[in-house]
């Protein structure tokens, strides 16, 4: 059986695949949550700073950033509620020593799974995107699932397009952050809908995955509580979903491999949606 599956996969590759890159470029000054250290890139060694005897030269980089900046995945250690993590452990005690041994990013296995894009604005008749601060309801998700003919199944990775991702490139990085306007996304009910369907991970094209009320910023994050603390569903944020949505692709092979950052609360990621050519 393993040999047959391997041959099928290799045949699919040989026949041609289309890969949609769902990750954002990491750039200095890009929009991000104000709760995390910003991305910074520098060249401590430039070409010409040191030249070898044969004329060769090398440039070297360094980066600093929070693990929840750019496209990234949340580990289960990221959020606690009433002092407890997903496994019931004491959140403060679990983080002693500066790392989360049990629920850190190093425990997130690489994902090669069925992916489903739920293009909610298409269902709502607002193809450019959901209104600022709009809460995507379970009914919105169910209608989108039905309209697309892409039923969500146990073990899937479900990506929710709100259309807010088009603002990532806005010259003012605070626009995408949406503190004053609010940001569309699911609430606790939408997160419960996803968890009840047994999804392995859920993602969105917004800075915090879930709906942010106008003026409230990250004051409360009930969907994070439901998914990360109560139900054990990974969250992927700041996805680029415009291209795959424009291509009309709603079902695909989803590939994501987080960095095995031992004890970290999250990891930068470059997710891919792979479909037959």
Image (cartoon, rainbow, N blue to C red):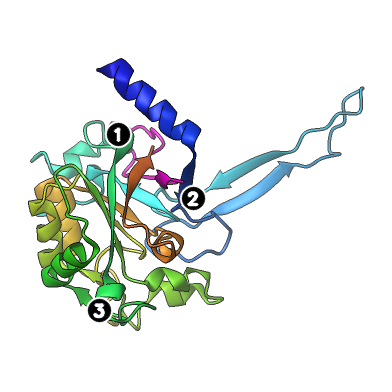
Q: Residue at x 66, y 49 (%)?
A: 42
- Inspect this view and state whether residue 265 appears: yes
Q: CA distance from mark 2 to mark 3?
A: 36 Å
Image: 5 above or below 21:
above
Image: 252 above or below 150:
above
Q: CA distance from mark 1 to mark 2?
A: 20 Å
- Between discs 1 and 2, the one toward the N terminus: 2
**Of 33 and 23, which appears nearest the observer?**
23
**Residue holding disc 3:** 124
Query: Depth-wise, is mark 3 or mark 1 nearer the camera?
Result: 3
**Residue holding disc 1:** 97
Q: Residue at x 43, y 27 (%)?
A: 10
Secondary structure type for disc 2 = loop
Query: Depth-wise, is mark 2 or mark 3 nearer the camera?
Result: 3
Q: Position of residue 240 (x, y in %)?
A: 43, 60
- Between discs 2 and 3, the one toward the N terminus: 2
- Predominant secondary structure in magenta? loop
């Amino acid at each position: 059986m393993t040999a047959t599956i391997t041959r099928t996969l290799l045949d699919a590759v040989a026949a041609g695949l289309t890969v949609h890159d769902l990750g954002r470029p990491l750039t200095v000054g890009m929009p991000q949550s104000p709760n995390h250290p910003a991305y910074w890139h520098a060249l401590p060694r430039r070409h010409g700073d040191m030249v070898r005897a044969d004329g060769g030269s090398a440039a070297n980089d360094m980066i600093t950033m929070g693990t929840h900046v750019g496209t990234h995945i949340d580990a289960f250690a990221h959020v606690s509620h009433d002092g407890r993590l997903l496994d019931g452990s004491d959140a403060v005690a679990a983080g002693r020593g500066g790392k989360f041994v049990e629920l850190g990013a190093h425990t997130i296995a690489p994902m090669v799974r069925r992916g489903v894009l739920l293009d909610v604005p298409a269902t709502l008749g607002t193809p450019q995107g959901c209104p600022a601060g709009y809460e995507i309801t379970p009914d919105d998700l169910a209608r989108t699932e039905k309209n697309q003919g892409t039923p969500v199944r146990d073990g899937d990775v479900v990506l929710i397009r709100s259309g807010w991702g088009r603002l990532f490139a806005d010259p003012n990085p605070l626009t995408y952050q949406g503190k004053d306007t609010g940001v569309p996304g699911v609430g606790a009910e939408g997160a419960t809908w996803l968890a009840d369907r047994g999804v392995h991970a859920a993602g969105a094209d917004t800075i915090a995955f879930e709906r942010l009320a106008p003026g409230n910023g990250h004051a409360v994050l009930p969907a994070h509580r439901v998914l990360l603390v109560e139900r054990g569903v990974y969250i992927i944020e700041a996805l680029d979903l415009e291209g795959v949505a424009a291509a009309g692709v709603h079902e695909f092979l989803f590939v994501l491999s987080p960095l095995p950052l031992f004890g970290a609360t999250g990891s930068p990621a470059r997710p891919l949606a792979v479909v037959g050519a």
